[in-house]
Image (tube, helix red, strand yellow):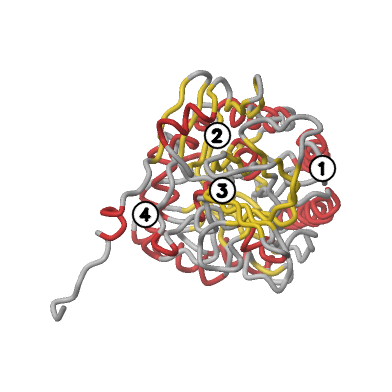
């Protein structure tokens, strides 16, 4: 459920009409719903109410500080993968103790920064990183609380580019090497082993891969404890999908029941890192029709948003529902369109063969489920400006990231002396 709906034939974000925002902001822009973020977080949290659980929102899904602050006020921590994301989490008021630092290529500078902030947990992804972290912790007179991120060699059944838990992937420590890495961690002065971590991928729509991976991890925890490791915490990552098209993924309650069944006998605290599940359907991308191009072969609805604003359809062939801001009349005439952007790439397509009502220049459309991996992946390809982000709260809306200006963008370039 989200809070974008038609009222008297016009699409609203909570209690604000989309045309009202367009009148002030123009298009394209991202729009986030506070009520939807709040509801999704609470529904997810309720699914784990019987186990001590820290929910760390995956900042990579949506790093806008207004989004992070909204979730922080609900009790959320942050799953981060860079120094910049840690800075954003802290700026949003998230306690350092609720920050997890993941990622396969943490630099020494990033490790030092995170150590100085006293973050709650480092998810170590290699023996080499473990040694680096210990060295940097010792230099600072600190101990780093760590989990080893274990690669369980489980196929998540999701898109190849967002699957992370198979042995050929770059993420985590291999299943076979894991016991030795924990033994090494126990020897290191700058390391405090507290947890086991895993994450097998994103947009997973079947519970079977989760069960297979988590059962393996539970067995690993028992084995490590027998070897003298005090495993207090289990970090099971994120990855539960959302409905983009007709396929409906399991509900958070089903996911929670599965995890609780596995984790409860271990007596572990639980860390979970949802991203898309919280933010995906809490955001939309609002765009305007530039022109309607009809050919003998296809009809094209050319809009002012493009692949540089929302990369997922081009990068992953991802499906996003596209609707009109003016509610279509029941039984009204429709056309088959390819919805495309103006970027000079054949791949700049938001949707092919979409059934849409008749549209013309200036009409407004919305690309749904754009709250995760939307604005965070945007760029300035074709020298197009980064679009603004808007947050709605009831009858109010606010610009939470302004539209970039051409002076902002071009001003980043500097000429060398010889020019």
Kindly identify the residue that appears in the image at 55 percent across and 51 percent down. 291
Q: Which residue is mark 3?
A: 61
Residue 73 screen position, x and y as percent: 50, 27
The dot on residue 113 is 4
Secondary structure of residue under mark 4: helix
Q: Is residue 228 visible?
A: no
| Residue 214: mark | none
Q: Residue at x 66, y 69 (%)?
A: 180
Q: Is residue 256 left or right of residue 72?
A: right
Residue at disc 2, secondary structure? loop
Q: Closer to the camera: disc 2 or disc 4?
A: 2
Is the residue 74 above or below the residue 150 in the image? above
CA gap, disc 3 and disc 2: 14 Å
- Residue 76 tag number: 2
Question: Which mark is first along the chain, 2 or 1?
Answer: 2
Closer to us: mark 4 or mark 3?
3
Q: Residues within 10 Å of mark 4 (few under 14, many from 20)?
A: some
Label 1 secondary element:
loop
The local crowd at label 3, few if under 14, some if 14 to 19, many if 20 or more residues have their Cα within 10 Å, is many
């Amino acid at each position: 459920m989200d809070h974008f709906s038609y009222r008297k034939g016009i699409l609203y974000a909570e209690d604000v009409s989309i045309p009202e925002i367009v009148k002030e902001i123009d298009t394209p822009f991202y729009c986030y719903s506070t009520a939807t973020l709040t509801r999704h977080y609470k529904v997810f949290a309720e699914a784990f109410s019987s186990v001590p659980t820290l929910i760390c929102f995956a900042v990579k899904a949506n790093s806008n500080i207004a989004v992070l602050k909204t979730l922080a006020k609900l009790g959320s921590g942050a799953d981060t993968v860079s120094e910049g994301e840690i800075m954003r989490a802290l700026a949003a008021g998230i306690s350092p103790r609720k920050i997890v630092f993941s990622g396969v290529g943490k630099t020494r500078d990033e490790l030092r920064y995170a150590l100085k902030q006293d973050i709650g947990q480092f998810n170590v992804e290699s023996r080499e990183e473990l040694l680096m972290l210990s060295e940097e912790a010792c230099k600072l007179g600190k101990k780093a609380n760590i989990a080893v991120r274990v690669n369980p060699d489980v196929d998540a059944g999701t898109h190849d580019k967002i699957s992370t838990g198979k042995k050929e992937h770059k993420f985590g420590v291999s299943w076979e090497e894991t016991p030795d890495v924990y033994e090494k961690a126990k020897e290191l002065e700058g390391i405090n082993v507290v947890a086991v971590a895993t994450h097998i991928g994103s947009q997973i729509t079947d519970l079977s891969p989760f069960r297979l991976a988590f059962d393996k991890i539970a067995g690993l925890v028992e084995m490590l404890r027998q070897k003298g490791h005090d495993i207090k915490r289990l970090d099971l990552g994120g990855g539960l999908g959302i409905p983009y098209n007709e396929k409906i993924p399991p509900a958070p309650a089903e996911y929670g029941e599965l995890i609780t069944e596995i984790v409860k006998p271990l007596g572990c605290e639980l860390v979970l890192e949802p991203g898309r599940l919280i933010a995906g359907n809490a955001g939309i991308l609002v765009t305007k029709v530039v022109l309607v191009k009809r050919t003998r072969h296809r009809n094209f609805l050319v809009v002012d948003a493009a692949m540089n604003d929302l990369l997922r359809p081009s990068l992953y062939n991802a499906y996003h529902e596209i609707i009109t801001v003016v509610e279509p009349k029941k039984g009204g005439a429709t056309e088959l369109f390819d919805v495309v952007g103006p970027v000079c790439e054949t791949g700049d397509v938001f949707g092919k063969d979409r059934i849409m009502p008749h549209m013309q220049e200036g009409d407004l459309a919305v690309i749904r489920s754009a709250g995760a991996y939307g604005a965070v992946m945007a760029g300035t390809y074709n020298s197009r400006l980064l679009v603004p982000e808007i947050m709605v709260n009831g009858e109010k809306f606010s610009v939470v990231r302004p539209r970039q200006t051409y002076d902002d963008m071009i001003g980043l370039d500097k000429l060398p002396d010889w020019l």
